[in-house]
Amino acid sequence: MNLAFSVEFQAVKRGKQTAVIFDDVNYDYDYMNNLSNQFALTLRDLGVGKGDRVSIWLPNGLSFIGAFFGILKLGALAVPMNVLLKEAEISHVLADAEVKVLITHSTHFPILNHVIENLPNLETVIFTDDHKESVIESEKFKFFSFIKRESDSPFLAIDLSPDDAATILYTSGTTGLPKGVVLTHYNLQSNAEFYADHIQLTDKHFGCIVTPLSHLLVLMAGLILIFLKGGRFLLFEKFEKEYVARKIKELGINFFIGVPAMYYMFLSLPEKEEFDLSSLEICITSGAQMPLEVRKRFEERFRTFTIQAYGQTEASPVISVDRLDMQRKFESVGYPMSHLEVKIVDPTGNEVPRGSTGEIIAKGHCVMKEYWRNPEATRSTVKDGWLHTGDIGYMDEDGYLHLKDRIKEVIIVGGYNVYPAEVENVIYQHPAVLEAAVIGVTDQRLGEIPKAFIVKKRGVDVSKEEIIQFCSSKLARYKVMREVEFIDEIPKTVTGKLLKRKLKEQYTSSQY
């Protein structure tokens, strides 16, 4: 098997059918297959083969797609990196994965110039745009611009074992230095196929992708899934809410993938015909869980259906999802994916009764192959085939999964467990709140107490006391935060996850 077979198959079946729309130009499956061939041939000429690591450091665009499938056609491993990563993060990924070739844009050269001499395994940098020779200062590496060959150049993807690695994706580092998660062709293809079945995605769907393709859910549920099904999608390099909304309306797009912040921004649009998003049938959230109140408001205004899923990079990434063939429970994170075993266990590893909280563990097609060259971390995370997620949740009587919080983020207030996500969901119900994050801070009497960091909506005023009083009417006393701090922005990873570790560091440093 090979994930890149999907590109070749669709080129035969739907050669002249539109696959991707980018910068208002339609590109068919023949074009996309040929583009991936060009990348495969270029990389092969550079000595790239099965098992080599090739990194993609590009924004959303045709080159990202062509490079991704071209790498897979050779049996090499794609290592995508978000364009928002900083110098230290880029250096860590390229060094840790021992990347042989980097595919990027020449605008990134200033960062590369600082780190490149410390990357002994990197041999070649390919720029996907024309660059000036004067920017090249290193004699240690080959630099050149990718030039598409004039004629079509056939290249057939090599056949691989299902257990062969397809990609290394680095965790967002919410708990420390990012680790490389190795996912196989089987991991990604099976997760995409079951996910498509559960949300009933077909070749009739017309998608819109704004979130970076370097994000795993977007890579799987957007690029890989749509190419497997033979659909089409509109691709944006960046998110501009008015422009994207107009395009959704104009083209009749019915499938959208975005982070929660994008849904907030859509809700802030004036209620005008040009911003009518009612053509949307399926709206997937990625990066972080969307607050319940935001989901309800979005669905009510635009008469659409939001899909909440739960997972993590180590799970390829989806473990559970709102399945359209089943009754939906808003307060849950959906039903476990087909052919996956999901259990809730106590600290000793014993399964707990339905309704009882514990750690979520999963076993089946989704579980990663390993952490890249980190056997100790792999053994501590995957035990007897079970992926230990580090997340706390429970399974209700109907088998739906409910997420409470990360094990490390639980706040213990005088012996009682307080889950930050539960408190945050209540805070979001207040009309003055745009974003919220709750952490535990030290308290001499109770051990820990909840503290809320809140971003207020523009032009709206509210006091700390009003927020606390509002939450007191909806939560048990021990769950209510004792402290509230208004801030301009909550720190996030490049994929939209709240960086509570940063908030804790900021709070701790402010105490001294």
Image (tube, grey):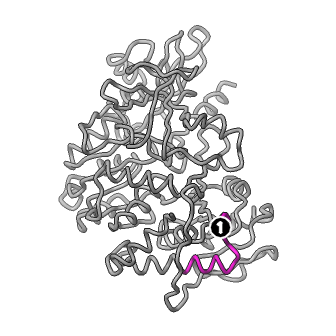
Report the front residue among 394 and 12: 12
Residue sticking out furthest to the top: 445
- 316 vs 471, left or right, is right
Q: Which residue position holds label 1?
A: 50
Report the front residue among 356 and 50: 50
- In magenta stretch: residue 39: yes
Report the front residue among 8 and 391: 8
Q: In terms of secondary structure, where does tag 1 sit?
A: loop
Q: Is residue 66 visible?
A: yes
- Counting from the top left corner in percent of width and height, residue 39 is at 57, 77
Residue sticking out furthest to the bottom: 150
- In magenta stretch: residue 220: no
- Counting from the top left corner in percent of width and height, residue 119 is at 77, 62
Residue at horizontal 37%, vertical 54%?
A: 257
Number of marks drawn? 1
- Counting from the top left corner in percent of width and height, residue 306 is at 29, 46
Which residue type does callout 1 highlight? Lys
- Counting from the top left corner in percent of width and height, residue 37 is at 53, 79
**Residue 250 placement: quadrant:** bottom left
Residue at horizontal 68%, vertical 65%?
A: 52
Q: Which residues are magenta?
A: 38-53
**Vertical placement of residue 281 versus 134, above or below:** above
Label 1 crowd bin: few (<14), some (14–19), many (20+), radius 10 Å: some
**Vertical placement of residue 111 versus 458, above or below:** below
